[in-house]
Image (tube, helix red, strand yellow):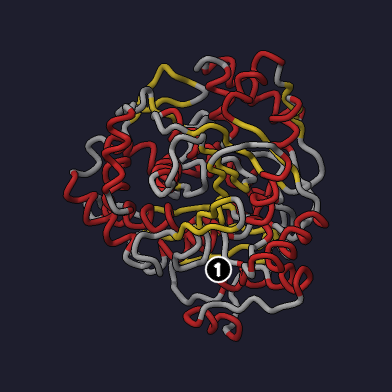
Amino acid sequence: MRYVSTRDTSKTYEFKDVFIKGLADDGGLFIPSSLPDYSEKEIQELKSLNYSDLAKKIIFPFIGNFMDKDELSKIIDKSYSVFRRENVIDFIKIGDRSVLELFHGPTLAFKDVAMQLLGNFYEFYLSKQKEKINIVVATSGDTGAAAIDAIKGKENLNIFVLHPDNRVSSVQRKIMTTGKHENVFNIAIKGNFDDCQNLVKSMFSDTKFSKDINMSAVNSINWARIIAQCVYYFYSYHLIEDHTKPTNFSVPTGNFGDVYAGYLAKKMGLPINKLIVATNQNDILHRAISNGNYEAETVSETISPSMDIQIASNFERLIFDLNDKNSEQTSKDMMKIKEEGKYSIDKEKLNLINQDFLSARMSETETLDIIKSVYQEFNMVLDPHTAIGYGAFDKHNLNGNNIVLATAHPCKFPDAIQSAINIKAELPNELQFILNEKENYDILENDVEKVKEHIKDRSK
């Protein structure tokens, strides 16, 4: 399989380039030049597979000659052996909708599903190459912890995690900052998540710097993340009992990566009806999908911090599709967004979006009310992000199999849970130790030159 950049389709790349680089040198995102296309019969044949074997089947066509089937099989088995569920996820019924629990990995968030795989991909790659890679990643709370757990202690790999200072929950931060591995560096940036993300993008676009430190990215822009996340859409589809009804997914998302993985599954033939983009009050994606107004506003601090984002990086992949894969037009659109902070989606393109996507926005009060009502009625505790996904179905009258992606364990957001239902959401026993461990992170100004200097001094 060959890949192109959303901003320049004249060059093609192998999976190895796409995985290691993360972001194209022209600032674009990598996209496959063609996709596997599963027939209805082939999709039904996938039903007999357990999660790991399904992942092997879905992922292999995307990785070309990066590794053979046997090598991929061993890596997938190793990656998913650290989850608390035999088949990685849980699929439970809460009221009239199903909930796909994706938080049974080592850092209690859906990011683990892809990140454990990426960490082992890096290890495999470096076992055959004489080089050192420095991973630089921005996090709104969960990505950083998942990336650290996947990379910690691995040879010839450093990881630098930028998080917004005082804008992630204390538990999210402690999972990141209490480790003692010498190849892990945490940086708190005086700003918001978008500032962290912009710093990482600026470092990538400085090709001299990114090449000097051999920089790589594991944010949701990395295509390997997307294909790994695509698997649980296929898996959960086969857990549905009645396929005569349409299947809809509600996905709490800020950076558009997790819901884009569902869109990818649909493009590959999975019979998904609608994907609901569920947002908090930082609702740029809701405004884009509901009325065509993709315009950055001031980021509000909320009880669902992983969605406190105004520029959704993966949305560029959808813009590329809307532009009929015209990379020149996509490049112009992205430059306009960078310079003016906005992009207007015309009626024709909005109609195309709405064939696949709907959206919903939840206020802080609505989010707390959903946590409370679900607990009172079903004795289940939802984290704030999952609550937003759950409540999004109440904004749309969609009949059929309605599936909510549960993206994080509620214990990661103790203040929100306490506020909503007045109980303390406890960490699993194996993570209790972080509450009393010493944290280790540096606080830096939102200044790309200072951040680059800090990273360069530690990337040797």
Sort mark 1 into few (<14), some (14-19) or many (20+) by Cα contacts within 10 Å.
many
* x and y percentages locating residue 34 in the rendered image: 36, 23
Q: How many numbered badges does the structure rendering display?
A: 1
Decide which of 381, 111 is in the foreground and name it. Answer: 381
Q: Residue at horizontal 60%, vertical 19%?
A: 352
Is residue 164 positioned above or below 291 on the image? below
Place of residue 102 in the rendered image (x, y in percent of width and height, measured from the top left): 49, 57
Q: Is residue 402 left or right of residue 54?
A: right
- Quadrant housing the N terminus: top left
Which quadrant of the view contains residue 201?
Answer: top right
**Kind of residue sitting beneath label 1:** Met
Please say whether residue 439 is visible from this viewpoint: yes
- Side (left or right) of 395 relative to 324: right
187 or 50: nearer the viewer:
50
Which residue is the site of mark 1?
176
Dot 1 falls on a residue whose secondary structure is helix
